[in-house]
Image: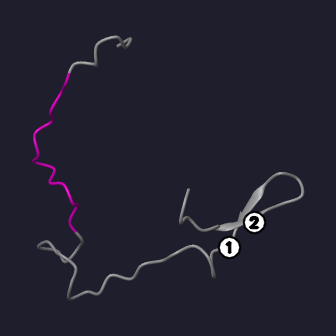
Amino acid sequence: GVGARRLGRHTRKGGYVLDWERRVPTYQVPAAAAPTGAGGELLPYVSVRTPLVTMPPPPGTAG
């Protein structure tokens, strides 16, 4: 899309090769800024205790 950058290049045979070192972004989370649980591991953004909400399919769709 607009503003997106290439992550690799096309090959002559129609494949795609990712350029991990230069183009694929990697993120490092500082240990002091990361939310941690009792064991020090990262916690999920949505709690596992969040209730599941079920909704009927929109009208006019096969479901």
Compared across the picture, whether 20 is left or right of 27 comes to: right
Question: Which secondary structure is most common in the magenta stretch?
Answer: loop
Compared across the picture, whether 22 is left or right of 11 comes to: left
- Label 2, on which residue? 9
Compared across the picture, whether 3 is left or right of 12 comes to: left
User: Residue 39 location, x and y as percent?
Assistant: 17, 74
- Label 1, on which residue? 19
**Magenta stretch contains residue 48:** yes
**At 24% from the left edge and 71% from the top edge, which residue is drawn?**
42
Residue with the most extreme front position:
2
Point out which mark residue 60 bears: none
**At 63% from the left edge and 75% from the top edge, which residue is drawn?**
20
Near-viewer residue (54 or 40): 54
Quarter of the image containing the N terminus? bottom right
Near-viewer residue (5 or 24): 5
Near-viewer residue (40 or 52): 52
Range of the magenta residues? 43-55
Marks 1 and 2: CB-CB under 8 Å? yes
Mark 1: which amino acid?
Asp
